[in-house]
Amino acid sequence: MKKGSIHIVPTPFGDQAPAYSPANGEIFFLWLMLPLGSDLFARVGGLPFYLLSALTIYCITRKVGAKTEGAFLSTSLFLITPSIMRYAGAPEVDLVALFYFLAAAYFVILYLEDRNPRALALASISIGLYLGSKYVALAFAPPLILVSLYAIFFQTRKPRRWQLSLRDVGIFLAGLLACGSFWYLRNLMVTGSPTYPVSLSLGGLTLFQGAYPRSVMTKSIFHLRGFCDFFWTNLRAYGGVVAFTYPLALFALVIHQVSFALRRLSAGPNALRPETPGRGVATLHKEDQIERQHILLLVAPFILGGIHWWLVPYNAEWRFLFPAVALSFVAVGLIYGKMSKAVRVFSPAVLLLVMWSIFVGMKRKGPGPLVAKWAILWVLPLALLITIGVYLIQKRLKGWRHLLGWAIIAVVATFGNNLFFWTLFFPRQLLPPARKAPLAKVLQEAVFLRQKEVLPFDLSSPTYGYFYEGWLVVWENLSGARLAYAGHNIPYHLYGRKWENEVFYVNIDAHLDWKFHDYDLYERQKSDYEVPHTPKTAYYRKRPSYEAWLANLRALDIDYLFIYTLHPVEKSYMIHDEENFPLENIGAGEHAEDFTLVFSNPSVRLYRLPK
């Protein structure tokens, strides 16, 4: 936004794919920043997509014939799923992509019904937006595209069938290309591969050469193979034991169908007679059978789960499973309508599973527990009060009202627990121990400034607290400065509270303007070039030179150098010092004549470059 153009932001300290991946979601967050010149709205940019996704789940569930109660159950399960709630309050693209996927599924279902070209146009636009949001959409979008093409060519009985099909193909391709092709065309023109940095292959034939093939990505620590890994990845995608709601619902459906069949058989041959003339056995059992589209929706989570496990290289990323999670809740809503008294027990049980998952899942991955042991004295009574409240609501309200009632209670309780309880009683857990500030100021920074890395929503990395200390130094002391950063791909906070600073990653070799693809293309021109054995090729760091790096810093008129410690994964293949700082800290520390240390803590170094 500060440069006024779309450009490739380097990611030298980690995976290179984010620098080249589709960015429709990022463009949306940019638009949220423009009106006020602030990230106030962008910080909760996932919230509208969280709500729109819930609304779309309701519409899909109703459209395929589920009862109102079933649709509200599906929506409620989605709204109180911990892993999804976590992304509702953060500027992440995963919920953006999920909404586009669900919208595409809804419009494809509409098109299957009556071949309305407007529904097809909206479906193609949604699929295009989905493809333009994340690379993983290339794995999950083909089922939507195949169903659309099936409907175009084989789902019509109108005259002039092929003329109508060609018209619809044109509509479908127009939407896909208009909304989903830009980023892939940009990569093709700049790097030579639309899916850069990954090579694009078909049947063993490389169509577009990238920095490495898919087989290299499967050697990453983010690629899993064992059944236990598959189980835990799915569990994390739901955020806890709420994952068992779908298999429990399927089990209930099987029991229901088996008991129905046994009752029919025990009734004797008269039970199979048509009730009225002209009605056959199939008609007699129609209300108790699952329609074809229902079967597809019931198996869709398994299909998407299989795609994620076998086709997506980084299948450890559980957030990629959100489409499967959402459709599993649609299936639960369908099953709800086929149950009878068992459902009255099922819905409160689901709530208890979800609440238990939310509370138990609040653990810190660093040393020591997140909270003192006595905190359980607060958690258990709250869970009990919520359960009693749900019971009373269920006694007072019937149908969809009691489902909606306990969903609202669960959402309010969970957000209150996440945001206010931990922040109010444990503010020092959110910031580093060395951070000395009045409690009111700590609460203000934790609640209202909403920096994601230090919020209760994400406490997975205690070292981010020390990063936060360094950011505060920049926010409070630097304005209109030009900063270079190294060690971590987190430049945003260095821009200042009102984006008054300029921030750069500065290459440590003689190539000031080179990006990752420039290094890759240069390496491929060598006669001894070999395809990398890992996606962590570190081309940016391959030929360091202190003199060249210093010349680059001066060429960009850099005022300050901000250095993070390396992530444990990155330090395994990058040069670093004893404190896990990257090569830049070694050079700055050994040349006091060029760099003056301004601030230091266990995870951050801030140097000033004398003019």
Image (cartoon, rainbow, N blue to C red):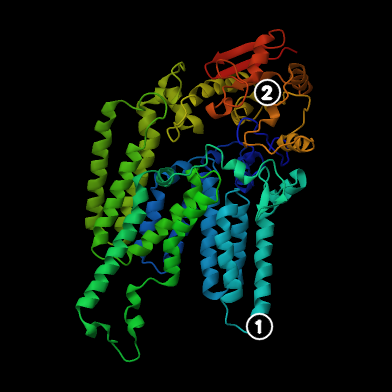
Viewed as shown, does residue 372 lie left or right of 366?
Answer: left
> Residue visible at 71% across and 42% down?
6
Q: Amino acid at mark 1?
A: Arg
Vertical arrangement, residue 169 with respect to residue 604, above or below: below
Spot the residue most to the top.
593
Task: Name the disc covering residue 53, or none.
Answer: none
Measuring from the top left, give residue 335's x and y in whole percent: 34, 63
The residues bearing labels 1 and 2 have C-alpha atoms spaced at a distance of 64 Å
Between residues 495 and 491, which one lies in front from this camera angle? 491
Q: Residues within 10 Å of mark 1 (few under 14, many from 20)?
A: few
Tell me the residue that label 1 is attached to: 160
Task: Point out residue 352 in the picture as x, y percentages from the top left corner.
Answer: 28, 47
Q: Position of residue 332 (x, y in %)?
A: 37, 59
**First in residue order: circle 1 vs circle 2:** 1
Q: Residue at x 63, y 57 (%)?
A: 128
* Picture layout, residue 384 above or below residue 339: above
Residue 226 occupies which quadrant of the picture? top left
Q: Nearer the viewer, mark 1 or mark 2?
A: 1
Name the residue that disc number 2 marks. Answer: 483
Q: Residue at x 41, y 29 (%)?
A: 365
Q: Amino acid at mark 2?
A: Leu
Horizontal arrangement in the rendering, residue 281 relative to residue 575 (left or right): left
